[in-house]
Image: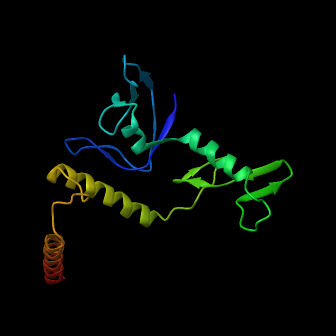
Amino acid sequence: MKEYFCIKDYLMEDGRLAYRAGETYKVTEKLKDEGEDGWFVLPSLFDQTHKMKTDEDFFDYFIDIKKEQKKVIKRLKNHNKHLPWAPYSSTKGGMFLDEFVNGITVNEPQVITPKDSIVESVIERFRDRSEVGIKKYNTTLDRNDLSVLEWLQHLQEEIMDACLYIEKLKKEL
C-alpha cells in the first residue's frame, strides 16, 4: 500500500500522540464504507491497526509521498535549466533532480545530510518531554487558554526551579 508522510503531530482526543510529524507511515489496507470515503488502516504510535477516515482531515496531517515527488519532478523538468541555482546536475547517464519536499528526497540517489548527534539527542529529549507533558496535562503547548502573563508566570516558575537546582548542586561540590 501507499506510504504517507506526517506533516504535523496528530493527537487523539485523549491527548495521546498517534502520529509524529516528520515520520513516514505505511497504510496496510483501505476499508470501504457505503456512502463514505472509507478508512485507511495504518499503525500509530500506540496501536498496530489504527483506522483513520480517508477525508480532508487525514490530508491535513499526511501527504502522499509518491504524489508529491511526481509534482516536484514535473515542476523541475519544466524549470529553466540555465539558471545557475537550478536544482539539477548533468551526468553522462542523464539528469538527477534533487529537491526536498518537507524533508523528502524526490529521487535516487538519496541525499543524506550528516546529523549532529548532540542536536539529535536534544531533539529526542524534547519529543519525550512533550509526550510526558501531553499525558500529564492532557493538552499541548498549542493551547490558547492562557494569557501572555500566565505563560510568563509559568516560565518564571520554571526558571526559579532551575536556580534552586543549581544552588543545590553547588553546595554538593
Residue at 14% over, 82% down: 167
Q: Position of residue 114 (x, y in %)?
A: 56, 62
Q: Position of residue 34 (x, y in %)?
A: 37, 16
For residue 68, which quarter of the picture?
top right
Q: Position of residue 140 (x, y in %)?
A: 23, 55
Q: Nearer the viewer, residue 148 or 42?
A: 148
Residue at 37% over, 47% down: 20
Residue 1, above or below 98: above
Residue 173, above or below 157: below
Residue 24, above or below 81: above
Residue at 32% over, 59% down: 125
Given the current orientation, which residue lies at the most extreme front position? 35
Residue at 44% over, 24% down: 29
Residue 109 in view of the camera: no
For residue 38, which quarter of the picture?
top left
For residue 99, which quarter of the picture?
bottom right
**Colour scheme used in the picture?**
rainbow
Q: Is residue 128 left or right of residue 85?
A: left
Q: Is residue 119 left or right of residue 125?
A: right
Q: Is residue 121 left or right of residue 76?
A: left
Q: Nearer the viewer, residue 65 or 144?
A: 144
Residue 149 in view of the camera: yes
Q: Nearer the viewer, residue 56 or 158?
A: 56
Q: Is residue 38 left or right of residue 164?
A: right
- Please identify the quadrant where the C terminus is shown: bottom left
